[in-house]
Image (cartoon, coloured by chain):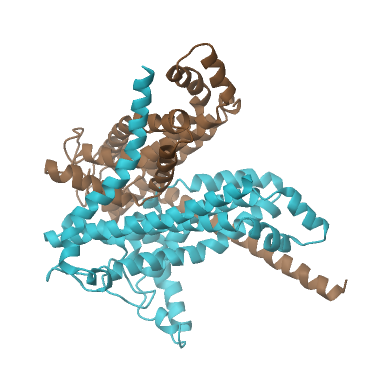
Amino acid sequence: MNAFIRDVSFLSAMGVVVLTAAIVFVLGVAAAPAFKAFGWTFFVSDSWNPVKDVFGALPAIYGTLVTSFLALLFALPVGFGIAFFLVELSPPFLVKPLRVAIELLAGIPSIVFGFWGLFVLAPVFQKYIQPFLIDTLGSLPLIGPFFEGPAFGIGILTAGVVLAIMILPFLTAFLTEVFKTVSPLLKESAYALGATRWEVLKSIVTPSTRASIAGGIMLALGRALGETMAVTFVIGNFHRLKLSLLAPGTSISASIANEFNEATTDLHSASLLALGLILFVITFIVLACGKASVALLARRERR
Amino acid sequence: MSSSRYKIRLFKDRLFSAFAVLSALIGLSFLLLILFQVCHEGLQALSFDTFTKTTPPPGEKGGLANAMVGSFLLSGLAMLLSVPLGVMAGVYLAEFGRNGKLAMVVAFLNDILLSAPSICFGLFVYEIIVLPTHGFSGYAGAVALAFIAIPVILQTTRDMLTLVPDPLREAASALGAPRWKVVFTVCFRVAKGGIMTGILLSFARIAGETAPLLFTALNNRFWNVSMAEPMPNLPMTIYQLALSPYPDWHELAWAGAMVITLTVLSINVLTRFLTRDPSVNRI
């Protein structure tokens, strides 16, 4: 009986390894025709033409990277601020409810964020924010081209903002946990020397948790890269490379979600599967780096 | 200490504190705004019909009853598949294979699968189930959801079992209990609340997942309780209603979004009460 239970649990654990390998293998085999047909040009070509059966992944990869980067750009300072507020500034009676609220909000399904983005955020963007950006920043040299074109409401920038709101609870909860791990002795010594809260954060808290913070950012980035529903609603699904952040674009997950069921040719579905494989590999690497740096810090602290 | 320098330092501190308060206000108000709007619009669209009628054709009134039942069935079957696998794998990591190389590799991969893109699971299940069986089915959807739930259950099971103090295990072993009996009768009794929390959390997670269902369970406008057919489900229904051009459908989508949000939130709140259970804190 003991051996039986042990073996069953062993096989279940092996299941995780098998599942990971099987995803890469199955997606790889299914995507092979696309890689065979286009070779390396699949990664650098920006033409996506189901009619001519020519596919390139560049606009989707670009959209995935840029929306995720924008999401981090918006969410990171805000998350940092909230975490600092919770750990150092907040009156004690507020800390618990706020933390619970943030953790609960992290559980809201991503489709709700996407849905809200399409019906609430996109019209606001179209009416107020995008015209404002076009008028003010669009005519500037250098950064102008990023804010050109008509105001569609949906687009890369809107997708980035929705993603930012979506990863904010996760990022904040993570940073709060990290800030709390700093030994109070260290902080209080700094305060005793007359340091201000900002100085304690800058020269005590951040340096001693650098690896964890980097890890948390990577984990949040991994989530943003792979997010499907929050992006699909608001990105516009447009397979053309545009410099402007206000233009509609596409991401890997949005392309798959929008087109896979309606793929016209075998090469079309193989190309979408290839996108899926690329996405899996990219997020795998990012998440692995994140995990590694968090684990690194945990080991250093134990010493 | 020159007072002007002191003033600059104080000013910097004030400035950053103001930024922190401001970002807390902005971030939280955005999140609460979403919650409020979903509930506000959802309540206006919600009616008794929402829970009793099926998805309507354009221009008619209807409800989401079929989608709710379908979602429940899909998640239920996914839980049946994932709970034994996830719990047993967690047992291996925390008990039998503890500190082993394999346990380390599994824990690492599991952490990654935990936040891997859910749409990739959908594509994977499409290739291994939908293609060979020549059709979208509830089974395929449930398998895809199970793949999402397993890492969550595995992780909490492992964490909760790791919290069980070793002297308890040693005491049971000293009385002559074989290892499996130690695990199931002693460790599980202590870690019960935590493991239940993990299972509930994974249920909350898959109840709102859309991407893995896109190419597996698909969706269905009609009543269907047969797992071999395309299954109606709430997230996909919201997706399709929202992308349609009909205002009636948009209203129904708001109602669906509210139902799904409140369901997930209440499960999460429930797990908080569970973890407050004294049997967990005793660890």
Q: Is residue A9 above or below residue A210?
A: above
Residue at horizontal 12 percent and vertical 69 percent from the top: A51
The quarter holding residue B89 reads top left
Q: Position of residue B158 (x, y in %)?
A: 47, 34
The tally of labels here is 0
Q: Nearer the viewer, residue B166 or B154?
A: B166
Q: Going by the image, does B98 lie left or right of A35? A: right
On the question of residue B25 being in view, the answer is no
Q: Nearer the viewer, residue B109 or A180?
A: B109
Q: Position of residue A261 (x, y in %)?
A: 18, 54
Position of the N terminus of chain A, as image quadrant, is top left
Residue at horizontal 47 percent and vertical 87 percent from the top: A140
Residue at horizontal 73 percent and vertical 65 percent from the top: B13
Which chain is the one coloured cyan? A
Q: Position of residue B152 (x, y in %)?
A: 42, 39
Q: Position of residue B10 (x, y in %)?
A: 78, 67
Residue at horizontal 43 percent and vertical 45 percent from the top: B108
On the question of residue B35 being in view, the answer is yes
Q: Going by the image, does B2 lie left or right of A283? A: right
Q: Going by the image, does A300 lie left or right of A126? A: right
Q: Residue furthest top?
A: B175
Q: Colour of chain B?
A: brown
Q: Is residue B283 above or below residue A119?
A: above
Q: Residue furthest front?
A: B101
The quarter holding residue A42 reads bottom left
Q: Nearer the viewer, residue B118 or A115?
A: B118
Q: Nearer the viewer, residue B234 or A6?
A: A6
